């Protein structure tokens, strides 16, 4: 990578530093991070590594290992990169950092991204968080600031970049997991308060299997923002029926929701019902995960997928096909779509030593029903944002 960096950017006396942030998989709690719910994501061993070096200019020169694209971001014209692929996520982060007083320093960068794009594993959050961590680290180093970086603050900054600059009205989960991941732990995150705790479950004899449908999704053009608007409409409707203000959909219990929802438009009812009951599933799943009750945890994963398919309507034929194939196998303890939906990935908890069986099964059955070939990744729950080395 260091040799490739020099090939892309030339030689210099400045040292090369490397920073990393992870992609994420969400075990359960989908589409409720922007509705004030609990979620259970984990950072994974697929992520974004940035190699960087000072360039004594007022710009950020960008290159990638996965594409021939090369470009430059002028710090005085950041708003002009709003619609520029390969640069917009980076420029959005730069703007948010400037807004909190971080002075941007000229650097050359090489992005090495192992999270598949459009997979629902948060390649965007990995890029954003790694970029923010790198730029603040360089700022701190220049100004002699020894205080550790507040990764929760960086996650919020990166969410704002995606909301306000890229145009995806996402919640905080992706960026939080990417920044705050911990080896061998999932994160129980209250998206309303940002209170969190690490959850270490008994995964002995089991492993995470992520299956990419290879149907890419683009949340800027999908119905993601539409779903969020529907949830806001449902919340507004419920507030007209409640004696006390309801802050978020997920602040309601299923019983409270059902008592208020009489007469609600069927679409809004379905969207809100998914959120309220999904939040309840997360609470029960965390309890099962901590006790090592993988059977219950797996059943809740399947219930989550059915709700996302039937009530929230963010699944698709490709995702449903993978779930249907794997849930029938005795070695699969649970499976569901993960991420925004409309394509992307499923996550499954499977017994170890079945990789060949899973590969052979999906190689045969998945193309029959979809005309596509899927990709399979086995990964661990990993650390989030960090600096790797200085050359």
Image (cartoon, helix red, strand yellow):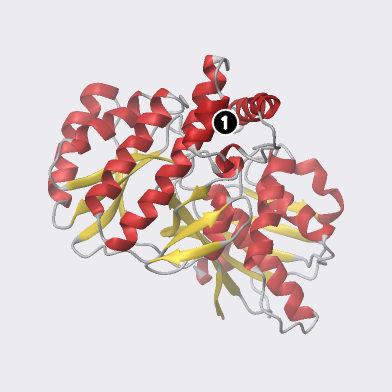
Choose between 1 and 314: the one closer to the eye. Answer: 314
Residue located beneath label 1 in the image? 224
Of 35 and 20, which appears nearest the observer? 35
Q: Nearer the viewer, residue 88 or 110?
A: 88
Q: Name the residue nearer the viewer: 193 or 342.
A: 193
Please provide percent x and percent y for residue 51.
58, 67
Quarter of image, res 136: bottom right
Left or right: residue 131 compared with residue 106: left
Give above or below for 102 relative to 347. below
> Alpha-carbon neighbours of circle 1 within 10 Å: few (<14), some, or many (≥20)?
some
Query: Which residue occupies 73% across, 80% down?
Result: 141
Q: Quadrant of residue 325?
A: top left
| Residue furthest to the right | 76
Q: Is residue 87 visible?
A: no
Query: Image check: 223 left or right of 84?
Result: left
Tally of numbered tags: 1
Quarter containing the C terminus: bottom right
Residue at 77%, 60% in the rendered image: 97
Q: Quick check: 79 left or right of 333? A: right
Q: Judge from the rendering whether residue 313 lies leftward or rightward of residue 296; answer left or right.
A: right
> Where does residue 190 sit, x and y in percent of width and height?
56, 54
Looking at the rendering, which quadrant does residue 238 occupy? top right
Residue 266 in view of the camera: yes
Disc 1 element: helix
x and y, in percent, of residue 146 in the image: 71, 84
């Amino acid at each position: 990578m260091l040799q490739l960096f020099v090939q892309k950017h030339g030689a210099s006396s400045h040292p090369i530093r490397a920073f990393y942030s992870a992609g994420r998989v969400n075990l359960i709690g989908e589409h409720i991070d922007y509705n004030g719910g609990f979620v259970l994501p984990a950072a994974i061993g697929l992520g974004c590594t940035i190699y960087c070096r000072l360039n004594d200019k007022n710009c950020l020169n960008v290159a990638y290992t996965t594409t021939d694209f090369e470009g430059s971001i002028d710090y005085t014209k950041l708003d002009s990169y709003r619609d520029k692929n390969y640069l917009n996520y980076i420029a959005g982060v730069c703007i948010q950092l400037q807004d909190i007083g971080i002075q941007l320093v000229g650097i050359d960068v090489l992005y090495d991204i192992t999270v598949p794009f459009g997979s629902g594993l948060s390649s965007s959050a990995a890029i954003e968080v790694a970029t923010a961590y790198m730029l603040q680290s360089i700022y701190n180093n220049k100004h002699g600031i020894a205080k550790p970086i507040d990764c929760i603050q960086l996650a919020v900054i990166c969410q704002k970049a995606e909301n306000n600059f890229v145009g995806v009205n996402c919640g905080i989960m992706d960026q939080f997991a990417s920044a705050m991941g911990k080896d061998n732990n999932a994160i129980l995150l209250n998206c309303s308060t940002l209170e969190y705790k690490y959850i270490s479950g008994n995964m002995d004899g089991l492993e995470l299997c992520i299956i990419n449908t290879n149907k890419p999704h683009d949340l800027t053009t999908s119905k993601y923002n539409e779903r969020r608007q529907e949830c806001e409409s449902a919340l507004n409707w419920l507030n007209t029926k409640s004696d006390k203000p309801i802050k978020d959909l997920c602040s309601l219990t299923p019983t409270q929701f059902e008592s208020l929802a009489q007469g609600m438009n069927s679409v809004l009812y379905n969207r809100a019902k998914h959120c309220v009951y999904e939040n309840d599933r997360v609470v029960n799943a965390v309890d099962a995960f901590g006790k090592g009750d993988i059977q219950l945890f797996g059943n809740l994963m399947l219930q989550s997928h059915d709700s996302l398919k039937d009530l929230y309507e963010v699944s698709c034929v490709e995702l449903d096909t993978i779930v249907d194939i794997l849930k029938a196998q005795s070695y699969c303890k649970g499976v569901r779509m993960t991420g925004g939906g409309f394509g992307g990935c499923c996550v499954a908890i499977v017994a170890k030593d079945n990789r060949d069986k899973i590969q052979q099964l999906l190689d045969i059955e998945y193309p029959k029903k979809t005309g596509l070939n899927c990709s399979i990744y086995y990964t661990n729950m990993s650390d989030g944002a960090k600096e790797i080395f200085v050359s």
